[in-house]
Image (spheres, rainbow, N blue to C red):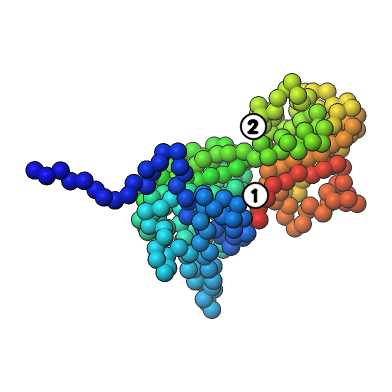
């Protein structure tokens, strides 16, 4: 019997060569996708998507990469996402479903900020734990033969990764390596955490031989809860407070003010995700009522 030999080219004929990823993006992430493709043409090929609407408000989406020829089938696809409101979130889930039904080799969803990470529990019956419902949506995505990889940075509650099951697996990363060179350039010699939870998450990422490690916390003083320093020496230190996200920033401000009161030479802040609802960031700007930070570092995780 004759032996069958396939003449189809192998996708990884050179084990040292990375396959080009077909890159798609939510509308808010398109500038980043274009930069990625321009700076790394050997790794990414960008396909613009039209995120339109019909007159009745329903989605009219045309995914890039399908015409005039299908460049996505059999390929590794990366989708840059931003769930900054419910409307765009639902649109992006629809695109994920179509991609996974298009015979792609794999799908990687890059969602730097997981906005429902703080809503993982309820105290009132009937309240919706959106961290769980989003996990159900991800877990119910079609399979392309392997799980969808969901890349998230500095997830607020790490147990969220275990809410996923079935066809989606969380891949957790941190933004701290982006911060370290800036701390070195600024001469920062102490890292503070606003509470014990932040310390447990981030403390191991900073060399205690280089940085004084300071842990803050709140204790009850009569009817009030006040910030105290529970561990570390703040005196004459150039401090950066590190946390995963900021909303209105009340605790961050109280922590910064306390460190200055205790003798810190300067205090800066870093958060991976600057949510700042209703332009709350203005309170931290020069002249604002929370202007205590020498520098306020944030990432571009929220376009």
The Cα–Cα distance between marks 1 and 2, rounded to whole angstroms, is 19 Å
Vertical side of 8 occupied by 228: above or below:
above
Q: Nearer the viewer, residue 137 or 207?
A: 207
Residue 201: assigned label: 2
Q: Observer-nearest residue: 36 or 269?
A: 36
Q: Of helix, strand and loop, which one carries label 1?
A: loop
* Image spot of residue 40 (x, y percent): 57, 50
**Percent coordinates x, y for residue 208 in the rendering:** 73, 22
Residue 180: x and y in percent read 72, 35
User: Which residue corresponds to the image point at 74% horizontal and 32% vertical from the top-left?
Assistant: 193
Q: Residue at x 88, y 25 (%)?
A: 235
Residue 210 in which image quadrant: top right
**Residue at the outermost left position:** 1
User: In x, y percent, where is residue 223?
Assistant: 82, 36
Quadrant of the frame with the C terminus? bottom right
Q: Is residue 99 left or right of residue 118?
A: left
Confirm whether residue 225 shows in the render. no
Residue 7 - label: none
Quadrant of residue 231 in the image? Answer: top right
Q: Is residue 96 left or right of residue 303?
A: left
Residue at (71% x, 38% y) in the render = 179
Mark 2 residue element? helix
Residue name at image x 76 percent, y 30 percent: 191
Q: Say which residue label 1 marks.
A: 301
Q: Earlier in the sequence, mark 1 or mark 2?
A: 2
């Amino acid at each position: 019997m004759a032996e069958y030999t396939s003449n189809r080219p192998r996708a990884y004929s050179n084990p040292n060569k990375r396959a080009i990823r077909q890159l798609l993006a939510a509308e808010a992430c398109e500038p980043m996708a274009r930069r990625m493709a321009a700076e790394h043409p050997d790794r990414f090929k960008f396909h613009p998507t039209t995120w339109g609407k019909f007159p009745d408000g329903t989605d009219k989406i045309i995914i890039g990469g399908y015409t005039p020829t299908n460049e996505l089938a059999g390929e590794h696809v990366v989708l840059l996402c931003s769930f900054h409101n419910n409307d765009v979130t639902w649109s992006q889930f629809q695109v994920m479903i179509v991609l996974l039904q298009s015979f792609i080799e794999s799908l990687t969803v890059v969602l730097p900020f997981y906005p429902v990470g703080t809503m993982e529990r309820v105290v009132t019956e009937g309240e919706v734990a959106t961290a769980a419902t989003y996990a159900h949506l991800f877990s119910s995505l079609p399979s392309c033969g392997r799980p969808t990889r969901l890349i998230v940075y500095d997830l607020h509650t790490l147990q969220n990764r275990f809410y996923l099951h079935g066809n989606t697996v969380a891949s957790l990363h941190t933004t701290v390596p982006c911060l370290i060179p800036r701390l070195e350039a600024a001469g920062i010699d102490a890292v503070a955490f606003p509470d014990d939870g932040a310390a447990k998450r981030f403390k191991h990422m900073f060399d205690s031989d280089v940085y004084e490690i300071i842990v803050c916390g709140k204790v009850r003083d009569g009817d009030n809860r006040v910030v105290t320093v529970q561990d570390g020496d703040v005196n004459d230190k150039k401090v950066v407070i590190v946390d995963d996200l900021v909303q209105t920033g009340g605790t961050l401000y109280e922590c910064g003010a306390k460190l200055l009161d205790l003798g810190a030479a300067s205090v800066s802040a870093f958060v991976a995700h600057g949510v700042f609802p209703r332009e709350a960031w203005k309170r931290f700007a020069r002249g604002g009522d929370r202007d205590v930070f020498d520098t306020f570092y944030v990432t571009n995780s929220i376009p």
